Amino acid sequence: MSYSETVNYLYNLQRHGIKFGLDNIIRLMSVLDNPHESFLSVHVAGTNGKGSTSAMIASILQAAGLRVGLFTSPHLVSFTERIRINDEEITEDEVISLTDEIREKSSRLKAQSSDFSPTFFEVVTAMAFMYFKRRKIEIAVVEVGMGGRLDATNIIIPEVSVITSISYDHKEFLGNTLKEIANEKAGIIKDGIPVVISYQEPEAMEVIEK
């Protein structure tokens, strides 16, 4: 496929909608040899400022001399903005190559289980992790797509989790109250992993502290 055909294929995956849960990404990572286990990571969730916070963390790590991957969403102009290493976007050829590999492995999984239908974000997450492994990064800064607890990026075990300011967003998916939304975003917190938290409204902080 050409680059434009590849990107169209990826966008067409959006017809599967948004699917919360880690089953798909766990199965996909397994057949791709778990690329997310080949590098260290920082996981960033929140409502306000998580993109800029992710970029800032990546810049600090890069300035410290590390080879740093950055996975963010959505993009502003080009799909390749989503996946970067030391400020350089993934190439169009790499997007084609990685998509072909993911599509082949996905087809095998679907042949084994008809209920396997990865979403756009799950495939792009897999692409980012494969690219980071292929290019031998040392650490990745990974921005949550939506929520946190059931987001595809939550497959990683980071060195540190970061939660920026939480407010009302994606209420149709995350809940109608600030406590419900905070519960989803706090889902990136893992036992034994340090957490950095920005200022939060009291009801959000109450949930996070649990």
Image (cartoon, rainbow, N blue to C red):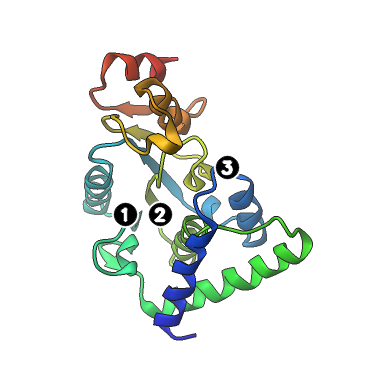
Choose the circle earlier in sequence order: 3 or 2. 3
Q: Which mark is residue 21?
A: 3
Mark 2 Cα shell of 10 Å, populated few (<14), some (14-19), many (≥20): some
Identify the residue shown where x is 41% and y is 32%.
Answer: 185
User: In terms of image quadrants, where is residue 205?
Assistant: top left
Query: Is residue 159 visible to us here?
Result: no
**Residue 121 placed where, x, y %?**
47, 56
Name the residue tied to disc 1.
Answer: 66
Q: Residue type at mark 3?
A: Gly
Identify the residue shown where x is 51% and y is 61%.
Answer: 15
For the residues labelled 3 and 1, say whether their Cβ atoms are less than 8 Å apart: no
Query: Is residue 180 visible to us here?
Result: yes
Choose the circle earlier in sequence order: 1 or 2. 1
Q: Residue type at mark 2?
A: Glu
User: In terms of image quadrants, where is residue 106?
Assistant: bottom right
Is residue 47 rendered to the left or right of residue 133?
left
SS under mark 2: loop
Mark 3 Cα shell of 10 Å, populated few (<14), some (14-19), many (≥20): few
Name the residue tied to disc 2.
Answer: 138
Choose the circle earlier in sequence order: 3 or 1. 3
Identify the residue shown where x is 31% and y is 54%.
Answer: 66
Q: Distance between the Cα atoms at labels 1 and 2?
A: 6 Å
Q: Distance between the Cα atoms at labels 3 and 1?
A: 32 Å
Toward the viewer: 89 or 185? 185
Q: Distance between the Cα atoms at labels 3 and 2?
A: 27 Å
SS under mark 1: loop
